[in-house]
Every structure is written in C-alpha cells, then in structure tokens.
Image (cartoon, rainbow, N blue to C red):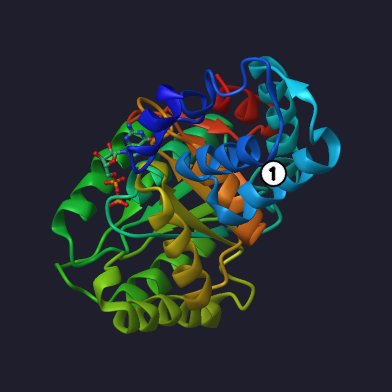
C-alpha cells in the first residue's frame, strides 16, 4: 500500500492518491475499512464525514470482495449525498435596492478576489454593483479592490484615509446605494483573526450600523475559505459563525494542487450552503458548486 503511505505522509493529500491500489480485489474487512477511513481523513474529509462513509460501507459491503473502481463509485455516491444538500447558488433578492452581501474571512483566503468575481458575474448579468473597501487598515486591500472595480466596471466606495472607521464607510455606502438604486452592494471586511475579539467587534459594528439604514441588511453573509489550508478552514468556519450570522460559503483555490476534501468536511460539520468555488486568480474563475461534479472530480 505504498500509495496510501505516500498519501498519509502529507498533511493534505489527494483522495485518489490515498485510494489507488488500496482495493485491488480485496475483502472489505476491518483492516481495509480502517485504511479507507485513514485515507479519507488524510484527504481532509474530516473525522465525522470519514466515519459516516465508513459506517455506510460496513453496513452495505462488509466481508465482500471489492475493487478500486467499485469503491470509488460508492465513495462518489456517498460524498455526493453529503454535498447535495449544501450545493445551493447564492440568491439575490432583486426587490432589495441594494441587496447587501457582507464578505468575511481571514486575510489571504481570497475575499477581495471573490468580490471581483461575483461583481463581474452580476454586472455582466446587467446588475448595478458597488464594492465597499471595508478592510480600511490595509492600503493594499483598498487599492486592489479599486483595480478590480475598474476592471469589472463596478463602482468602488473607498475610505478617505487609511484606517477610517469601517462601519462608518459601510453606512455611507449603503445610503448612497439606496439613493442610486444600486442592485447589489458587496462589502469587503477586515480579516485579522489574530485579534479575534477586536475583529468580532468590528464586524458586528458594521452589521449594526448598516441596519440603521436598512434593518434587513446584510441579506447575505459570505464566508470565504481557502481550500489549501485544510482543517484550518473548518476552524475558521467555526470562529466566524460565532462572530456573525454566516449564510453561505465560497471555497477558493480549488485549482492547481487543490484537494477539495475539506469541502466535504465543511458540509458534514456545518451544513452551510456552498455557493461557489474559486478556481483561479482571474475574475472569470468562479464556478457554481455542483455536488455531482465535485464528488466525481474528487475521485479523479
Ligand atoms: P483577501 O486578503 O482575503 O482579500 O485575499 P485576496 O483576494 O487578496 O487573495 C489572496 C491571494 O489568493 C491572491 O494572490 C489571489 O490572487 C489568490 N486567489 C484568490 N482566489 C483564488 C483562487 O480561487 N485560486 C487561486 N489559485 N488563487 C486565488
């Protein structure tokens, strides 16, 4: 089982690497099930989803002789069943002017890029979209969003000076968006997780202050998670869900050497909708999340 060992030696392995050669005409006994469970955990599926899948295998196939191909097909079905309930597109309430989307997540996960990608999609669909550069302390983040604004044809509301109050900025941006009948307001936020209580206070203040303009805002709270960070993404989801009312996820960096197993762990653990996945650095690199396609690609 050299390939399995190879998979286990990495912190985040690809599921197919861990499975290839594992079930070449092999009886599905306790040992085989245990190895399967380890391969699933190594591929970032998490203890809970791995346990659920292995239990279902035990019930349906224990003691039977199985092949790699059979195991892969059965796994694709199991993973598809975990993912199906969370594969839901982000719905925009067009009666809202604007529909406010608050975008949260740790720095570097891809918040700004995801805002650009969503902005491009929606403006191409004829919506009037404005970005709010709410990560006011990072000059680079503000600049980046301004560049994306000009590339995607979306307006950008930026702070007058570095470190300006993010809540005040969001308040002004929302008022202006109402006056201009903007369809969608995408609000970028800070992501300094090393100071958790300060970040929570800032995010909650942004929400509170926007609600003075529109008591129903924000209409969506998107958490952006980086798939390459493996189980850290699970931890981030837990922390952000405690801070704000997260309504859905975007999982980024699923291109390249991406693992993707983390999406299964997230679905199993939180049950939050996965609206889209990031597959590159360009504005066009956002895909709707499909449970069937995703589970298939996971098993390569
Ligand atoms: P933020 O700090 O959360 O706003 O993160 P950024 O949007 O600035 O993204 C951080 C880095 O990740 C940038 O270099 C992006 O180009 C890159 N990035 C974002 N999304 C993706 C993705 O889906 N795939 C890849 N390969 N890179 C991405």
Vertical arrangement, residue 21 with respect to residue 298, above or below: above
Indicate left or right for 38 with 230 as reference. Answer: right
Q: Position of residue 30 (x, y in %)?
A: 67, 42
Instruction: Point out the residue furthest to the right here.
Output: 60
Residue at 68% over, 34% down: 291
The residue closer to the viewer here, 134 or 52, is 52
Vertical arrangement, residue 117 with respect to residue 92, above or below: above
Q: Position of residue 162 (x, y in %)?
A: 14, 67
Q: Position of residue 279 (x, y in %)?
A: 43, 29
Q: Position of residue 66 (x, y in %)?
A: 73, 21
Indicate left or right for 43 with 188 as reference. Answer: right
Q: Tell me which image quadrant ligand 1 sits in.
A: top left
The residue closer to the viewer here, 41 or 224, is 41
The residue wearing badge 1 is 54
Residue at 74% over, 28% down: 74
Quadrant position of the C terminus in the picture: top right
Please tell me in which quadrant of the rendered image residue 259 appears: top left
Residue at 46% over, 24% down: 1
């Amino acid at each position: 089982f050299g390939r399995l060992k190879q998979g286990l030696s990495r912190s985040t392995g690809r599921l197919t690497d861990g499975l290839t050669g594992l079930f070449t005409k092999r009886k599905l006994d306790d040992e085989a099930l245990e190895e399967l469970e380890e391969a699933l955990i190594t591929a970032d599926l998490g203890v809970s989803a791995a346990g659920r899948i292995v239990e279902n295998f035990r019930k349906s196939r224990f003691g039977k002789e199985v092949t790699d191909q059979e195991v892969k097909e059965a796994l694709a079905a199991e993973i598809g069943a975990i993912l199906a309930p969370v594969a839901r597109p982000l719905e925009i309430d067009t009666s809202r002017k604007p529909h406010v989307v608050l975008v949260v997540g740790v720095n570097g996960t891809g918040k700004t890029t995801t805002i650009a990608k969503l902005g491009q999609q929606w403006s191409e669909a004829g919506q009037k979209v404005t970005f709010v550069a709410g990560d006011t302390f990072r000059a680079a983040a503000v600049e980046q969003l301004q560049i994306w604004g000009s590339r995607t044809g979306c307006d950008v509301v930026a702070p007058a000076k570095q470190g300006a109050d993010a809540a005040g900025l969001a308040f002004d941006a929302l008022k202006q968006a109402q006056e201009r009948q903007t369809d969608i307001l995408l609000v970028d936020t800070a992501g300094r997780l090393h100071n958790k209580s300060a970040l929570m206070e800032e995010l909650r203040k942004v929400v509170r202050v926007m609600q003075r303009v529109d008591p129903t805002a924000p209409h969506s709270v998107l958490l952006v998670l980086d798939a390459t960070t493996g189980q850290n993404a699970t931890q981030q989801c837990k922390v952000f869900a405690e801070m704000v009312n997260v309504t859905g996820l975007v999982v980024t960096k699923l291109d390249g050497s991406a693992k993707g197993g983390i999406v299964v762990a997230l679905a199993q653990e939180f049950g939050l909708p996965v609206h889209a996945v990031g597959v590159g650095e360009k504005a066009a690199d956002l895909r709707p999340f499909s449970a069937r396609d995703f589970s298939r690609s996971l098993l390569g």
